[in-house]
Amino acid sequence: MSLSSPPVSPSSPNPRNSTNRPLLSLSGIEKSFPGVRTLRGVDLRLEAGEILAVLGENGAGKSTLMKIIGGAEAADAGTLAIDGMARVVRSPQEARAAGVAVIHQEFHLIPALTAVENIFLGQEETSGGFLARRREREQASALFQRMGVDVDLDVPCRLLSTAQQQLVEIAKALIHRARILVMDEPTAALTSHEVEKLFVLMRELRAQGLGILYISHRLEEVFTIADRVTILRDGVPVCDRSIGAITRDEMIERMVGRPLDQEFPSRRVTRGGPRLEVLGLRRGTAVRDVSFRAHRGEILALTGLVGAGRTETVRLVFGADPKDAGEIRLDGRVLDIRSPRDAIDAGIGLLTEDRKLQGLVLRHSIRENFGLPNLRRWCRRGVVQHGRERSELDRCIAALRIRLADPEMRVGHLSGGNQQKVVLAKWLAHDCEVLIFDEPTRGIDVGAKHEIYLLMNELVAVGKSIVVISSELPEVLGMADRILVMHGGRITGEITDVARATQEQILRLAHA
């Protein structure tokens, strides 16, 4: 399993398939789940030496299509061909044998194993009947050097940062020397510097003749890295163009089926007095003497690089982690928050960064997840009043435009954007006075983002206070009334004139 010889020489003047047959082609792909027709007659082609962006709103069918290509799902109808030869791919193992590797949006790592052990899991190197650990380690080290990143090879993956775990996932796919690489939101957990390094690697792979299917909701990345774009809407391809033949506005309109007047909707809200006050908050070296105020009718953004202490700070506010020192006040009243229940009872809600692990119970229904923080309100003499619960849920489903077949279906079966809306619905029903949104639009499409932005505007218009953590600087500049920048567990700067602020200004403070 050597890395020494690429599938196609990088010096080759034209790595594309000289036979004029696409590396990958799909024709008439159909797929339905109970109550939902996900894909309807999808045609798609991918050339060797091409990066094809596959876009669409959450629920448009992108992830299902990628699962079919990767062997995790079987199509109900249609054909899949590689190099012009029809294939029946019944499992991820058969897909990998056919030269297809998938980098999933959710990590598929064994937390207790090291990076090397995860990369070679199921494909271990052997010598004389023994595991060739040294050779595996050398190959993994060479691969990470080639990627231009630094990952500790000897510690369990649970001790790696989120960004480093994502890089291990990418290495797992590359080590098998796939010819077709499917990348589902691979940059969601990476810093801008790490994204740049990933793009350098992707361009190198493209030059070697690989075909890359790239799913992302970050449109600026699509224009940076993709050669062509295919857009799905409601399970149907509605656009297939070279990247130079489509504008950002056209891309958005094709995805959502209507023009968006403004990507970041404007609002006019008079800022009131302080609602949430955080004074001298500390926890080890992760949060160091952090103080700030969030006002009534204000969207306050916390931003900075990965590891700056943003999430750690709001987890202390919410009582998810114990603080070493500091004081938290709401409307001038000192709060004794020792657990999330204390924060919820006080009127503080947290939409967590990782909705799947911390925000939802994926095996439970949409209704059950919606009710979790609200059961006390709907209980009478120890019995849940399901009529009230269902009525509140129906109201939130309509307000948030949550796409679902049945409130009793598992929340894990929803698209990422609709899962995020279910988490939002929990806190809307609780009527929290302060809402903390940690990466609220990560992994969701531009249409769902717009709806969340509108909701945020509506909430501050009625006097709520919102603290939002975001790594997307255009989002921070487009939505925040005030920006706090963090680095090394401290607040290193405040930007009050957001209308004149720039990404470069934020980045300078983030490196302070």
Image (cartoon, rainbow, N blue to C red):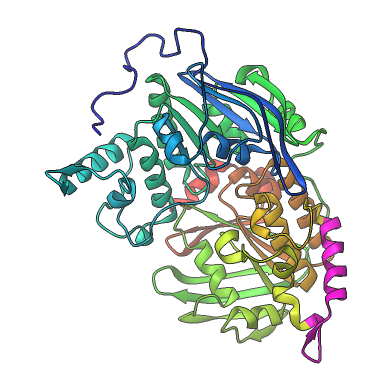
Residue at x-position 36% and y-position 41%: 171
Q: Is residue 431 magenta?
A: no
Residue at x-position 51% and y-position 51%: 106
Which stretch appears magenta?
377-399
The residue most toward the bottom is 381
In terms of image quadrants, where is residue 455? bottom right
The quadrant of the rendering that contains the N terminus is top left
Q: Is residue 244 above or below residue 217?
A: above
In the visual, does 403 lie left or right of 121?
right
Q: Main secondary structure of the magenta part?
A: helix
Q: Is residue 389 magenta?
A: yes
x and y percentages locating residue 464 in the rendered image: 77, 67
x and y percentages locating residue 144 in the rendered image: 30, 40
Q: Is residue 269 visible?
A: no
x and y percentages locating residue 443 in the rendered image: 60, 47
x and y percentages locating residue 243 in the rendered image: 61, 21
Q: Nearer the viewer, residue 162 or 490?
A: 162
The residue most toward the left is 128
Residue at x-position 41% and y-position 19%: 209
Q: Is residue 444 above or below residue 493?
A: above
Q: Nearer the viewer, residue 162 or 481?
A: 162
Number of labels in the image equals: 0
Q: Is residue 480 above or below residue 184?
A: below
Q: Is residue 15 visible?
A: yes
Residue at x-position 26% and y-position 51%: 153
